[in-house]
Image (tube, rainbow, N blue to C red):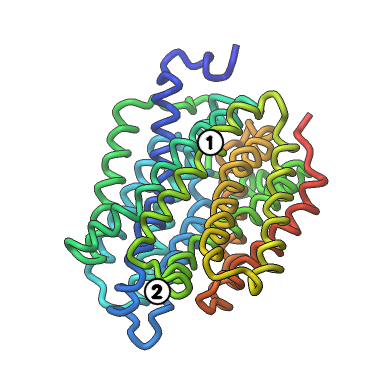
Amino acid sequence: MTLAEAHPRRLGQAEFVALMAMTAATIAFSIDAMLPALPRMGADLSPADPERAQLVVLAFVIGTGLGTFVAGPLSDAFGRKPVMIGGAVIYSLSAAAATWLDTLDGVLVARVVQGIGASGPRVVAMAMIRDLYMGRGMARILSLTMTVFTLVPAIAPLIGAGIIAVSGWQGVFWAFVVFSAATSLWLGLRQPETLPPTRRRPLDLAKMRAAVAEVLRHAVVRRAMLVQTLVFGILFSTIASVQSIYAATFDAAETFPLWFGGVALVSGSVALLNASIVERLGMVPIIRVGVCAHLLLSVALLAGWSALPEATRFPSYLVWQFASFALAGLAIGNLNAIAMAPMGHLAGMASSVISATATILGALWAYPAILLGDGTPVPQVAVGAVLSGVAVVLAARLREAA
């Protein structure tokens, strides 16, 4: 009997996957729908240095990382659903507040708070999945979740561009409120609580420190977590600077939402592929192939960029962007499943530590791509090459828990 079968009141797998995907997609929607707004936000809020608007992406990511430290322990103490819905309320209030602010610094603060709120749905969704599934079965569910999840970044820039055309960048923040309200209502009405009171862990600082130490001491968890930070770094550096590269290098600012959505949608097929093969091939070999392929492609693009004919540069960059998104779809679910497998007895805390570390360090790894950005793909690809190179070394020592 699976863990899911032990819960007599549970959603069907298809609805559960869709709900978890849309709940976790709060993060993707909050990032990707903002991308078309960055030029206008820069012009309105930071006219002396419009490129600072890219920090709107990283501010949200950092807030998400900070929030994950508390979302998991709170869900272990009070249950999954209250924390997910409470986080959605914080997320929505801060999004609404951002529409009234007229300085970039103020919006950045609101985005950090918004990220803290979004961490509730994101982190606790993974703990909820772990309550019901484990091992390669969990990896399969996470991969299916990622497949549905990819529909959001595929359409989010188009939605953002449409909203901006009608109501300015402030309208995007109101869209966040509507999205969060819809997923919270779905969760509240349809999803049973997966952590019964008998399995909850009271908030105890000493026990929390002990739980964090247990997570960090476990070699399997630690290695999977470190590789995940590097994969997140590649993903965040790509997302944060991709819009400016389309505009400055390829003169494709107006068609950016279409290209970005198309690449994200095609990349989603990789997560579906992983879901179909992971139980047969195993998680570690798939991760190793993914990071090796990204490293080779990054090095090849860097080495040949200056010699590439002008007509082939854009399609070459599209292939690299696809590879970065595909690596996330291929590796993140597997890495989470590897890291969470030994931590079922403290899934909320483990989810918090793993997600917080991966998110915050991933944002820090991505920062050089923004700092060194010159409007060309070269800094972004160089950062991707370094991160995937380190990931190859660490992935060589990855193991699934016995």
- Residue receiving disc 2: 53
258 versus 183 height, above or below: below
Q: Position of residue 401 (x, y in %)?
A: 76, 33
Say which residue appears at 70% left-offset and 53% top-offset.
226
What amino acid is found at the position of numbered circle 1 in the picture? Answer: Ala
329 versus 373 height, above or below: above
The residue carrying pointer 2 sits among few (fewer than 14), some (14 to 19) or many (20 or more) residues within 10 Å by Cα, namely many
Q: In the rendered image, which quarter is residue 331 located in?
A: top right
What amino acid is found at the position of numbered circle 2 in the picture? Answer: Ala
Residue 89, label in figure: none
- Residue receiving disc 1: 127
Q: Position of residue 14 (x, y in %)?
A: 42, 23
Q: Secondary structure at mark 2?
A: helix
Say which residue appears at 29% left-offset and 28% top-offset.
189
Say which residue appears at 58% left-offset and 47% top-offset.
328
Q: Let me know if residue 142 appears in the view.
A: no
In this rendering, the count of numbered labels is 2
Q: Nearer the viewer, residue 194 or 394?
A: 394
Query: Left or right of 27: which side holds 352?
Result: right
